[in-house]
């Protein structure tokens, strides 16, 4: 209902959507202390991820309304659409630039684009909850999006970033690695969304545990990527 969208709720939706992503961005940028990326480059990747959201929504709407694809097939298409768009957001804003000069940058920019995507997507979901349900529902949605969706976007895009990082000094393998990374990212994204939709109550927490384990794994991947040297 419209009355649910007050100035306070508007502020909560924005803060609930963007603050978690910004906190995570601060956390991941600490992994690149030795050669930090230019702030303008980070901002460009973050905004690129945000721009990908309306594009993804348009494509998802098209597959649902005009192609009639629903259920698991729909979840799969939407997952891969989002992963591909996040990749292109990072590619267009960072990967072709001169400051993309070391393997760890691939992880930094993919995660940054993913967090930009998550921030706007989460904000829109919270807005929708305020309009369709209640203030409490909006707050709950914000909390769940922070716990689940933001981690999911980070983990899935990190897979692509790692694939690029490990082929950084072997450009002949780059395309193969990107395709493989996108396939793994899309599969992770689809699996999470599918089981979230099928879960009930406490089962959601069981689904979130693998995501937290994936985040821990990403930290170790960062350390390994930092040690990659030109052969």
Image (tube, rainbow, N blue to C red):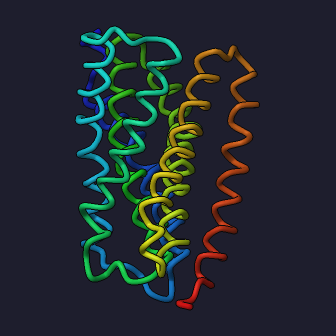
Work out whether 192 lies above or below 69.
Answer: below
Q: Image quadrant of residue 48?
A: bottom left
Residue 18 visible in the shown view: yes
Expressed as whole percent of the image width and height from the top left, the position of residue 10 reads 29, 32
The N terminus sits in image quarter: top left
Residue 111 at least partly seen: no
Percent across and percent down for residue 130 are 36, 19
Q: Nearer the viewer, residue 207 or 88?
A: 88
Q: Residue at x 24, y 72 (%)?
A: 40
4 and 194: which one is in front?
194
Quadrant containing the C terminus in the rendered view: bottom right
Image mark count: 0
Residue 176 to residue 101: above or below: above
Q: Is residue 200 left or right of residue 161?
A: right
Counting from the top left corner in percent of width and height, residue 225 is at: 59, 76
Q: Foreground: 150 or 191?
A: 191
Residue at 44 percent across and 87 percent down: it is 35
Report x, y in % for residue 136: 49, 19
């Amino acid at each position: 209902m419209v009355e649910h969208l007050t100035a306070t709720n508007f502020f909560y939706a924005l803060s609930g959507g963007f603050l978690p992503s910004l906190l995570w961005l601060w956390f991941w940028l600490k992994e690149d202390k030795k050669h930090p990326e230019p702030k303008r480059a980070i901002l460009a990747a973050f905004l690129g991820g945000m721009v990908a959201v309306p594009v993804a929504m348009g494509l998802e709407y098209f597959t649902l309304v005009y192609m009639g694809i629903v259920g698991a097939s729909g979840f799969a298409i939407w997952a891969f659409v989002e992963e591909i768009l996040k990749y292109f957001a990072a590619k267009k804003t960072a990967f072709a630039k001169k400051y993309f000069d070391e393997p760890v940058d691939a992880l930094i920019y993919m995660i940054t684009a993913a967090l930009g995507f998550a921030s706007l997507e989460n904000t829109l979901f919270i807005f929708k909850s305020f309009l369709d349900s209640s203030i409490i529902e909006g707050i709950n949605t914000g909390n769940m999006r922070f716990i689940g969706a933001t981690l999911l976007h980070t983990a899935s895009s990190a897979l692509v970033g790692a694939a690029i990082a490990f082929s950084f000094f072997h450009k002949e393998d780059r395309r193969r690695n990107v395709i493989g990374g996108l396939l793994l990212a899309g599969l992770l994204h689809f699996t999470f969304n599918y089981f979230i939709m099928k879960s009930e109550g406490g089962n959601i927490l069981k689904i979130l545990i693998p995501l937290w384990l994936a985040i821990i794994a990403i930290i170790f991947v960062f350390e390994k990527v930092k040690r990659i040297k030109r052969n």
